[in-house]
Structure formats: C-alpha cells, structure tokens
Amino acid sequence: MSGEIEKLQELVDQYDNFVFFGGAGVSTESGIPDFRSQDGLYHQKYDYPPETILSHTFFMKRPEEFYKFYRDKMLCDTAKPNAAHQKLAELEQAGKLKAVITQNIDNLHQMAGSKKVLELHGSVYRNYCMKCGRFYDFAHMKASTGVPRCECGGIIKPDVVLYEEGLDNQTINEAVKAISEAQVLIIGGTSLAVYPAAGLIDYFRGEHLVVINKSPTPRDRYADLLIQEPIGQVFAQIQC
C-alpha cells in the first residue's frame, strides 16, 4: 500500500461524513467510454461531433440521427460496477459516505448498492414521453427502433441533460447541501471540465479535499491528498 493510499485509509478511519463527486473516469474501468480520453467518444468518427449530436438543438432537429448515436454509444447494459462503485456503496452502508454526486448517466452506483445518488446529468434508465409524460424504462429504449414514440404519439426523450439544457434544481440543491456539510470531499474520475457541475466543488468548506484522477485537474493544487491512479485500483485497497 502506497503512502497516498495509507493517508486515504486514515481519513476513512477518522471521519464519518464523506461526500464523493465523480465523473466518467469512475465508469471507464467498467468498460464505458468517456468523452475526452484518447479512445473516448470525442475521438471516434461520426457525421457530427458527439457534443453536437448530444445537444438539445440536434435532438429536436434530427431525432433519427440522435437516436442512432444514442443507441450505439449511450445505451450500455453490459457494464458492471467496479471496485470504486462497490467500495462507495460499502462506505455508505458503514455510515461514512453521505452522498454520491455523479456526472454519469449509467446507473452503476445504484447497481453497486448506493442509495443516496445525485445524478447531475440524469440517467439513461429513465425516459419520458415529451407529450404526456409517460415513463419508459431502459429495456424499452434498447428494443426500440427509429425515433421511439409513446402510445399517445409523442416522442420519448431520455431523462438525460443534453448540451444547452439546464440541470435539475432539486438535484443541484441537494448536492450543494451535501458538499457544504461534508467533512471530507473526494473528487474522483473527473477532469472537472464540465460546468456548471464542476462549480459545485466551490461549496466545500470541510477539512480535507481528496482528488483521485489519472490526469491533472484544476483542483489538484487545492487538494490535501492527490492520487493520480485509476480510481477503481485505489478504492480496492481501502477498508471500511
């Protein structure tokens, strides 16, 4: 066990009010591609850049092309929770972790057993008719073809925050409350490049900031503990 891991273990042993703020790097070890790494979605070839396809304007104008990309790249039901997801669930069960705040939309935290999960960017496991509001699950969307439509005729839209769309106010408020009350904030698997989500870190007033990410982040210099290793490998070594 390295010195950095030992320090993290000491924090886990000492404190009982942790909050975890995570991004795509938490899920890459489960086989879900991120957007900015060399083999992420930004570096794969489509008729349009992924950030264009995943925008509200594109969804409204070209829903057929949106759903081609969406089914191909966003609806991943083969991924399983990794050591990071599992350890966070264990920390919650042990009464130490108060909330997981995630930018991911893959439901892996819930699959691992986490109960308090604040999904800043929504989830592919929730879908709603834009006309009548009827709910549709993941399996329905996976099995659908073309532009999925409700029985009422309305287009079914994933409960995912697209570019140009605002975050859910209640989720933001809960995240701000959790971060502002935390003794220890662990930032993991995120480059902190996506706003307004990344700006929530500013509400932390606790005692220790931990950053676990393979690549540098804008918050590294403020961290009390910086671990530049894959987050699953790090959490696999921690005992609750």
Image: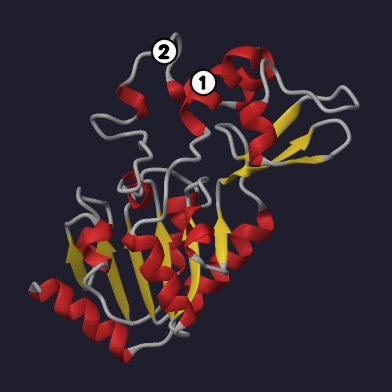
- Compared to residue 172, the image places residue 235 above or below, namely below
Q: Is residue 121 left or right of residue 21?
A: right
Residue 126 is marked as none
The colour scheme is: secondary structure
Residue placed farthest to the left in the image? 2
Q: Secondary structure at mark 1?
A: helix
- For label 2, count other residues whose C-alpha is less than 10 Å away and answer few (under 14), some (14-19) or many (20+): few
- Compared to residue 69, the image places residue 74 above or below, namely below
Which amino acid type is shown beneath numbered disc 2?
Answer: Tyr
Q: In the picture, residue 7 is in which quadrant?
A: bottom left
Query: Residue 118, image x and y in percent?
Result: 56, 60
Q: Residue at x 20, y 62 (%)?
A: 221
Query: Residue 186, image x and y in percent?
Result: 34, 68
Mark 1 vs 2, N-terminal side: 2
Q: Secondary structure at mark 2?
A: loop
Marks 1 and 2 close (CB-CB < 8 Å): yes
Q: Report whether residue 158 is seen.
A: no
Q: Residue at x 32, y 31 (%)?
A: 40
Q: Report whether residue 215 is seen.
A: yes
Looking at the figure, which quarter contains the N terminus? Answer: bottom left
- For label 1, count other residues whose C-alpha is less than 10 Å away and answer few (under 14), some (14-19) or many (20+): some
Q: Is residue 55 left or right of residue 39?
A: right
Q: Residue at x 62, y 36 (%)?
A: 165
Compare residues 179 and 19 and report the one nearer the observer. Answer: 19
Compute the Cα span from label 1 to label 2: 9 Å
Residue placed farthest to the bottom in the image? 14
Instruction: Find disc 2 in the rendering and name its residue.
Output: 46
Looking at the figure, which quarter contains the C terminus? Answer: bottom left
Instruction: Find disc 1 in the rendering and name its residue.
Output: 69
Q: Residue at x 77, y 24 (%)?
A: 155
